[in-house]
Image (cartoon, grey):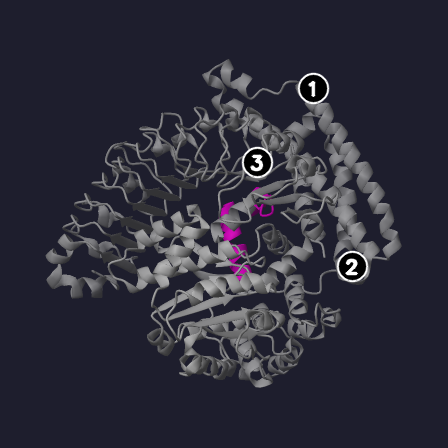
Amino acid sequence: MEVVYGTAVEVLKRVATAAEQEICLAWGMKEDLKKLEKTMSTLKAVLLDAGKKQEQNEALRVWLRRLKDVFLDAQDVLGEVECELLRREVVKTHGSIGRKVRRFFSSSNPLAFRLNIGHQIKALRQELDDVAKDRIHFHLNEKQDLMQGRREMTSSFVRPSEIIGRDSEKEKIVNMLLQKNHNDLIISIIPIVGIGGLGKTALAKLVYNDDKVTQEFGLKMWVCVQQDFNVAELTREILKSAISATSTINENFSIDQALKGTNDISNLSVDLVQIFLRTTLKDKKILLVLDDVWNEDRSKWNEVKDLLLTACANGSRIIVTTRNSSVVSVMGTTPAHNLECLSEEKSRSLFFKYAFGDEQLAEQFSKLKDFGKQIVQKCKGVPLALKTLGSLLSSSTDEGEWKYVRDSEIWELTQVENDPILSALRLSYNTMSPQLKQCFAHCSIVPKNIRTDRLDIIWMWMALGIIESPNDKRDLEDIGESHFKALCARSFFQYLGDDERLFNLSQVFEMHDLIHQLASSIIKHEVYTVNSDTKMSCDQYVRYLMIFLRESHGQSISTILHKLKKVRSIFLGYETEQELPSVEECFLPTCISKFRYLRLFDLSFLSFDVLPTTIGTLKHLRYLNLQGNKKIKKLPNSICKLQSLQTLILSRCSELEELPKDIRYLINLRTLFVTTKQTHFPENGIGRLKVLRFLVIFQCRNLRSLPHDMRYCATLRTLLIGDCEQLDLAIGPNEVIPMSLQSLLIWDSPQVTALPHWLQGAAHSLQRLGIRGCPNLVALPEWFPNLTSLQKLFIFMCPKLSFLPIGMQRLTSLTDLKIVGCDALKERYKSEILRIGQLLHTFQTS
């Protein structure tokens, strides 16, 4: 299943735009681009029909892959023109400084560049013509999408309020957990078995959070098990969960200590991990949930079980969720609880809950209710299928759409392992807009079972050019946000919670593994994963490369790279939480020299001393992540030649001495995370980034002030400042200029005594302000009530804050106020808390 149509739509827009660019007119390329556009338009007209017929036609699928490859090549060639326009903009903006800037960004041979682009466009035309000729073999029609014109979903993300139809199963398992018998001398293991999408994890969560269960067990732990069942890593995960649970139970055990403890575990030897785990679990009656177990190796499981048996008190329990029934015999468990599909009655309740919000509302639409009952029958009691299709239809009362879902031929396709869920998910996917399809499909390049922030997903989409829209005046981030919400509304992402340390600005999600499987199937020929089991073979269409290493990995990465040509995205990670083995010295130079169209380069938590100066040749690069590199001391100034760069992540680079001196040349940079040893940011640096939207200054422990030219960051919307021991916000520009800042979060910065004066410039835009761990903050400024757009105000652990400014009642937009750990303020307003709470809705003091 391909997303060729969406790619074609996006490329056509860019071709049309390029044909009218002054630079292309000057180079005499308009005629070639128009011919290219005409051929692409002809092919685009038949792509919708091709997309429907490809499922049962292998030759057609191969043709579509060839066609998409040409469209992607066209994106790269058009990107060359866009990069040249950005280069010229840099020279025009900064060239007045002198010939140095013009030399820094000069093209070695403008005439050769022009001729090369012209040659590439002609070659694209020829290749596209060759592919276009073959379409006659498939008898494709120029049809419109059956779902075209359907109302786009406008609902925001919906959190499931309850799990329908599992009450009896929950009570049964709870009773098994609480049952007293002679078997309490050993750990009883209760497996929950069923096919994907039945809600095994959801049922386990219901049991895990039951009040009677919480009272019965002194320690509860939840661990998601990796498919390869690495004993050492599973033990580490159990210890992490135990530490986290202990911090929740023990009031004297702080969250920060718990977090620090879990971070340090990765550095411990296996023996020390086991010792700490035995100590933590000693004499405790535990409940451990092992979610999604696939292991069939009895010896591995016995290692884990023996460790737990020597540590826990009698009557401890383990709940295991698995799709694999053979796991039950391997683990030596009590009889399995086989989770059945929902009854038709419960299935209808669940489906209509998602389709209408309430089953009773379905009575108002009798015809839709009839269609719904028939759709429910096809879901065969699988909750994930019911939720997905219910969410799909939740915004529509169009009988045609409901009938389309009911009668879709996709239901008749061959099932994978007799599991109906993939058909339901494919149907939901097929009814999405072309751009949304691309967003969803490219979520598969995020590794499976990874929890991710929605912002990371949006930045990835931006880097890959998926959400570019020349005719849409909204920010790319806003377009990405709307697409993400649309996927959430279809239950394609599961909301896990907010990061309270970032005052709920960060929202964490994960993708159900079956949904990830669907996304992977869409662009499977373009994604290549290298791990310890990888065979030496790859597809010519590979564009996205993921490399996962472990110490025992014996392959030469560079050997694999030499087989690839068109990679756009590289994610380098590790299979275990142990320190990543050193990558080959030639790895980075090889990537840079081979993949000139690279757009996304994720090297997070790797340790290498030097970033090659040739990084500056990757002019298409939009996302570069160096987070957690604890060795690198300096970045080459050539990195400032990356005029397409949108996201640069340098957080936790604890040895980085300074930012590149010409960082202002990154004129397209929208997101920047910084950790450096600098005491001051120089002038003409960060403050000159004219399109910067998101800035994080983190663990800059020598930093004494914000950039003095911060006033130029008129586009900045989010500013996060954390763990900056010397930073004093009061030092800096005093002038007030209009800003677009919407969120300001400050934490663990003891020198912060006051809010910056320039913040007044955001009086009509600031919506969220969070302050935590600033012990020397004494007061909010007199002008604070002028922040009339403020909606959320969080102040935690600021013990010297003694009063609120007069006029707080002017904050009429404020809906969420939380003040915790501010003893001086609590004492001063003790008698007024009730009044203030009534005025500002939620005033908390603890």
Q: Earlier in the sequence, mark 2 or mark 1?
A: 2
Q: Which of marks 2 and 3 is nearer the N terminus?
A: 2
- Residue 509 in magenta stretch: no
User: Where residue 212 sits: x, y (%)?
Assistant: 36, 78
User: Where residue 701 sits: x, y (%)?
Assistant: 31, 35
Mark seen at residue 583: 3
- Residue 477 in magenta stretch: yes
The residue beneath circle 1 is 111
User: Where residue 738 sits: x, y (%)?
Assistant: 34, 39
From the viewer's side, name the closer residue of 454 and 572.
Answer: 572
The residue beneath circle 2 is 54
Q: Distance between the residues labelled 2 and 3?
A: 40 Å
Name the quarter where the C terminus is drawn.
bottom left
Range covered by the magenta-colored residues: 461-488
Please state if 392 lies on the left or on the right of 770 as rendered. right
Q: Which of marks 1 and 3 is nearer the N terminus?
A: 1
